[in-house]
Image (cartoon, rainbow, N blue to C red):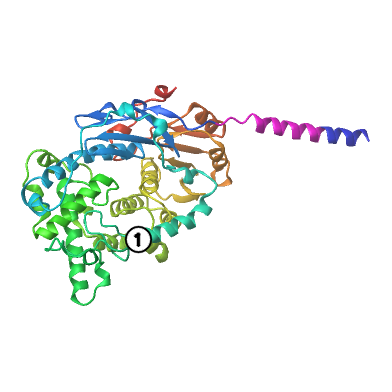
């Protein structure tokens, strides 16, 4: 009887102790940080832009708001901030082109408005910035399977819809709705005639509109190449300008790239320094890139369906797909390629796509990765080295400790005697302590090949955030 009582008492004590441990688990909300703690000063202000000083972290990524003379622009990570600031000279060049030479002539009938004076950043308190994205929280949570189906559906829908933001003549939604007719020569043409989509017409009209679309796409890529920007940039203002001037070149029947190269001033500076953008991507058509990437991937991955799905789905642009293929070739994993492509095909946007590319870059920066295996840990990726060491790349801006992250790191797939987590940015003191207690080695501001100056190791230390 006493023995049973002792066993019951021990059980109650264990249960109580378990409850106490759970009750004392400490989690933290994602913070609002000062921008200088995350990036270098040159990225925070310049002659034509200023960054709102308060930066909200959402889904482990920093969300910046940039005030420019073209209007406010959002950057959903530290990396995207550098890209958006780097695109400003190109936007200036396009704006100048729209007001001179062949472009101005072609656009004469349109009301082309440029941005007004720079906005006072102090009028943008961080709590009024709504609709902040979720960053890359899906990669480090337990709900990925529930989201993947939705991501696939969104991908399908986004590929069917093409909105022509550069053409002033609207038409019903339908396949390739960017393929509008040229502006009517008779301004008094009926509304019905203006709004009739090309695909609703018959005969040679369809062939003519298809040819016009190919010209539009070619003109757009030619300008992007001259300016050294990604033709698939997610910058809405840059995207709008490229669309507008590409259509102007089609309507005016002149070479957009040549016309843009003939203007002076800001454009000449942009043309002289195309940055680090992959010139191979700019010199190929989308069809050529897809065929080349398919061939390269089939040399690494065994699942043809996964390869083709990745090439047509997800949040990857041509530039990012090509970058992912290049990083895979560097690592040449013994296994895990198929799983990575399946994961990549479910990405919902540029930030998630860049996460996977940067994760591979972080792995490749480590010595001894040759002949390793690529693993999928829930929705994140990890690398198992031949030595038995486990590497977990986390290309995030700021890691905070929460219940989802705790569950992620406690999963069986991440159990190893020797393991290292590579954090692209910073981590809170609490996150560092919890990871250390779980046996992880930690590298903050982890270096990787091609990392821009703002992210290089040693320029910002953890003490800046304490």
Q: Quadrant of residue 256?
A: bottom left
The correct choice, above or below, for 93 with respect to 315 in the image is: above
* Spot occupied by residue 53 in the image (x, y as percentages of width and height): 34, 27
27 or 460, nearer to the observer? 27
- Classify 10 Å Cα crowding around label 1: few (below 14), some (14-19), many (20 and above): few
The magenta stretch spans residue 188: no
Q: Which residues are magenta?
A: 10-27
On screen, residue 414 versus residue 298, left or right, reads: right
The magenta stretch spans residue 26: yes
- Which residue has dot 1 on it? 159
75 or 308, nearer to the observer? 75
* Spot occupied by residue 54 in the image (x, y as percentages of width and height): 37, 28
Q: Main secondary structure of the magenta part?
A: helix
Q: Is any part of residue 335 visible from this angle?
A: no
- For the point 40% across and 58% down, which residue is it? 155
Q: So how many labels did they put on this image?
A: 1
């Amino acid at each position: 009887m006493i023995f049973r009582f002792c066993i019951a008492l021990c059980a109650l004590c264990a249960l109580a102790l378990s409850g106490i441990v759970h009750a004392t688990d400490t989690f933290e909300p994602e913070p609002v940080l000062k921008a200088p703690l995350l990036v270098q000063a040159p990225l925070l202000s310049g002659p034509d832009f200023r960054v709102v000083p308060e930066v909200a972290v959402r889904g482990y990524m920093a969300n910046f708001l940039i005030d420019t003379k073209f209007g406010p622009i959002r950057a959903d990570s530290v990396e995207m901030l550098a890209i958006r600031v780097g695109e400003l000279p190109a936007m200036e060049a396009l704006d100048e082109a729209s007001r001179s030479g062949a472009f101005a002539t072609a656009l004469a009938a349109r009301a082309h408005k440029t941005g007004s004076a720079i906005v006072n950043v102090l009028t943008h308190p961080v709590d009024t910035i709504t609709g902040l994205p979720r960053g890359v929280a899906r990669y480090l949570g337990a709900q990925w399977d529930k989201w993947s189906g939705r991501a696939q559906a969104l991908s399908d829908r986004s590929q069917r819809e093409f909105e022509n933001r550069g053409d002033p003549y609207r038409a019903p939604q339908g396949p390739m709705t960017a393929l509008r007719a040229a502006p009517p020569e008779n301004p008094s043409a009926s509304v019905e005639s203006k709004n009739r989509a090309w695909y609703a017409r018959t005969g040679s009209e369809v062939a003519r509109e298809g040819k016009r679309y190919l010209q539009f796409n070619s003109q757009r890529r030619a300008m992007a190449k001259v300016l050294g920007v990604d033709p698939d940039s997610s910058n809405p203002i840059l995207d709008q300008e490229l669309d507008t001037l590409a259509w102007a070149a089609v309507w005016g029947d002149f070479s957009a790239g040549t016309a843009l190269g003939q203007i002076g001033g800001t454009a000449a500076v942009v043309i002289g320094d195309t940055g680090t953008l992959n010139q191979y991507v700019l010199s190929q058509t989308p069809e050529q890139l897809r065929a080349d990437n398919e061939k390269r991937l089939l040399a690494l991955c065994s699942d043809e369906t996964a390869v083709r799905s990745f090439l047509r789905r997800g949040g990857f642009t041509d530039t990012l797909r090509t970058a992912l293929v290049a990083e895979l070739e560097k690592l040449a994993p013994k296994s895990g390629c198929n799983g990575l492509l399946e994961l990549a095909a479910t990405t919902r946007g540029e930030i998630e796509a860049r996460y996977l590319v940067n994760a591979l870059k972080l792995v490749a920066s480590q010595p001894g990765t040759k002949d390793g295996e690529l693993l999928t840990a829930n929705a994140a990726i990890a690398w198992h080295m031949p030595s038995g060491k486990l590497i977990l790349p986390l290309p995030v801006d700021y890691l905070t400790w929460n219940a989802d992250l705790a569950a992620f790191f406690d999963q069986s797939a991440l159990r190893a005697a020797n393991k290292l987590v590579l954090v692209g940015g910073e981590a809170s003191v609490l996150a560092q302590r919890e990871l250390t207690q779980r046996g992880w080695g930690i590298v903050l501001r982890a270096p990787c090949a091609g990392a821009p100056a703002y992210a290089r190791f040693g320029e910002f230390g953890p003490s800046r955030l304490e």
